[in-house]
Amino acid sequence: MGKEILVNIANRETRIAVLEDKLLVELRVEREDLVVGNIYKGRVENVLPGMDAAFLDIGLERNAFLYVADILPEYVDSEPDTNDSAESVSELAEDPGAQEAEHDDIEIVLSGIHAGAELIDVVDDTEDISMIAEDSSESKDFDDTADAEPESDRVVKQAAHPAAKGDRRPQRRPQRGRGTRKQVPIQELVTHRQELMVQVVKGPRGTKGSRVSTRMSLPGRYLVLMPDANNLGISRKIDESKERDRLKRIVEKFRQPGYGIIVRTEAEGRQTADLLQDYQMLVETWELTLAKARTTPAPGLIYQDMSLIYTIIRDAFGSDVDKLILDSPEDFAKAHEIVDRISPHLSERIHLYDGEKPMFEAYKIEDDIERLLRRKVWLKSGGYLVIDQTEALTSIDVNTGKFTGSTGLSETILQTNMESTNEIARQLRLRDIGGMIVLDFIDMDNARDKKSVTDALIRALKNDRSRTKISSISPLGLIEMTRKRTRETVDVTLTDTCPYCHGLGRIPSAETVSMNIERDIRKMAKTVTSEAIFVLAHPDVAGYFVGPQGEDIERLERQVQRSIYVRSDINWHIEKYEIEPGVAARIEQAHPLPKRGQIVETAVTKSMLSTPPWATAYCLDGYQMDITNGAKNQGQNARVRITNVGRSLAIGEVVSGSGSPKAPSAPQGGKQDRSSGSKRPQPTAA
């Protein structure tokens, strides 16, 4: 599988695209300084026992969230773990926070999660360029709940004061191992105004602040240093037992007690000098961080992760990447300098893009970015996915669409579901969707088919850097899954919530707005004595309000005993309208009516209430005109003779021989005609 990383660098934005076999599978857009991985000295502002959490001021725009489990080790045993048991517990993914799981270790429970099935843990230990310092516990949102983890008073004191006087680093905490959970209230661990050293493990999202942890991890090229642990873990992606033993022996020679280490996949085949240099650099970084923590007042930044280019090379540019392509000569030079220092054998894989077209355009990534913002995603067979994101969860619906199959319905359903698994996995990575996800596959009756789809989904998710857990298919054809949320999804980064629908995705129809206008006029008629009412609205709304042949507005005028004048403005939003009471003479003076027999040139269009041979046009200041023989002139300019005039609607006919091929754009209706037949009576007072 060919893998390429493309880095597009602009003044105010950096975009990183990961391609596998020329197909875009991951996209990251950075427009501001990263905070994930940074270490801050924070001050506790609020302690919330009801949430088992505290909020810290770390100097960012919003307070950071510290959950009780992020203060404590996951488990505490009555007896300490050996190195071997510690290794089995702490073998983490190359994202130094995520625990690994192998496909062979997965037990699939076909009865479904609703029948008590276990969640399947699907993890790959590929490095995550975004969450290098992420915590090893499962991610949770601020409003989630979980059991607290145990901790001794000694460890709490160390967590609260990580840089004690005269000590270059804190004494280590009890080892992370398997043991009995014991609930510890948050108020016994931290207090108001207490100062803590914390690391950001999840960036701010929406209205929520960053999530932080007191457990630190510093990633290097070959190792990850965990200053508050004592474990030695080897990446499971290094599967040869001899190589794992060799690396373990090397690291044990120089590892100091009280420092936990994870050996990353890139360490495979490396010699002692390489690993020792990486280790010494990480230890020195940690000691400098502690020294700065002693002199920095809270809140304040005490450690900032490397530049984005360095982070990409350190965490994503490994032996599995064929090319790293940058379009900035300056950053290309920086990348070469970094790689020559830490991985010189990969320097030939760094390339500078110097094509005439912009790089993302040349690789057709811009088209992919435009498509990833759509709800509907087409499959090659003709089926499609519908992706809807809500506050609580993301739903992905699988549909056969245009795919009809060839052998039978059950086979068609199975083929569509199987094809959709790869696209679902790709879209989760591409859009960076996290949290709770519900997959609505097409219903299958055969248990073997359900297992095939579940297995296919597990295989497809193996390349995902983020930790995922899935259930087996429920009797309703649903799979519930979670994916570790690390930051805002791509669509949130690239788009804003619609100011009209406020994220709903729908707005009132033109007919609904016209009914609102009618109700408002009825209310106004009871409180205002004016003889006339003037209405200004969008053309589609005005068309519905006037009604076929003006019959609706004529009936309303009789009921409220007012003359009503309607005009339209194509530039108005569909929901916007104005109603003003007034005097009929003054309204007609401000908005003069055309004369009977007058010939006007106008653009002919089709209204939502017109059927051939009728058509609609707008003249003067948005005055509506229905044309008896205008259907053949739709989309053209035509000369129209007015045959009848009302307050809000006129009738006209196209003058023989008129019509020019290109007309200015005119209002278009989106509803079906409510009238029948091609003949209309002439308007009366309307």
Image: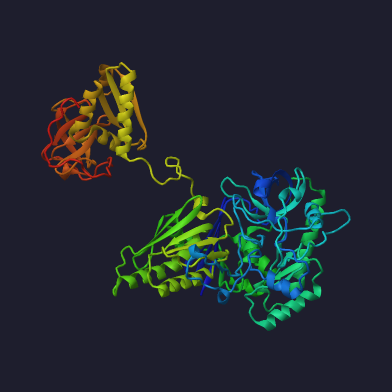
Residue at image point 33% right, 24% down: 523
> Which residue is the extreme one toward the bottom?
242
* Front position in the image: 343 or 95: 95
Vertical placement of 87 versus 536: above or below? below
Residue situated furthest right in the rendering:
166
Residue 358 visible in the shown view: no
Q: Is residue 238 left or right of residue 246?
A: left
Res. 631 image quadrant = top left
Q: Nearer the viewer, residue 536 or 136?
A: 136
Measuring from the top left, give residue 497's x and y in whole percent: 47, 45
Residue 88 pos. (x, y %): 69, 73
Q: Nearer the viewer, residue 445 or 239?
A: 445
The residue positioned 29% from the left and 68% from the top of the image is 404
Q: Nearer the viewer, residue 74 or 555?
A: 74
Q: Is residue 259 above or below residue 144?
A: below
| Residue 586 placement, left or right of 69 | left
Q: Position of residue 667 (x, y in %)?
A: 28, 40
Residue 24 vs residue 326: left or right? left
Q: Residue at x 42, y 67 (%)?
A: 420
Q: What colour scheme governs how the chains and residues are painted in the rendered image of this protein?
A: rainbow
The C terminus, quarter of image = top left
* Total numbered labels: 0
Please name the residue shown 74% across and 73% down the image: 275
Picture coordinates of residue 211 (x, y %)?
A: 65, 52
- With respect to residue 353, does 495 lie above or below? above
- Using the rendered view, name the quadrant where residue 578 is placed: top left
Residue 676 seen in this snapshot: yes
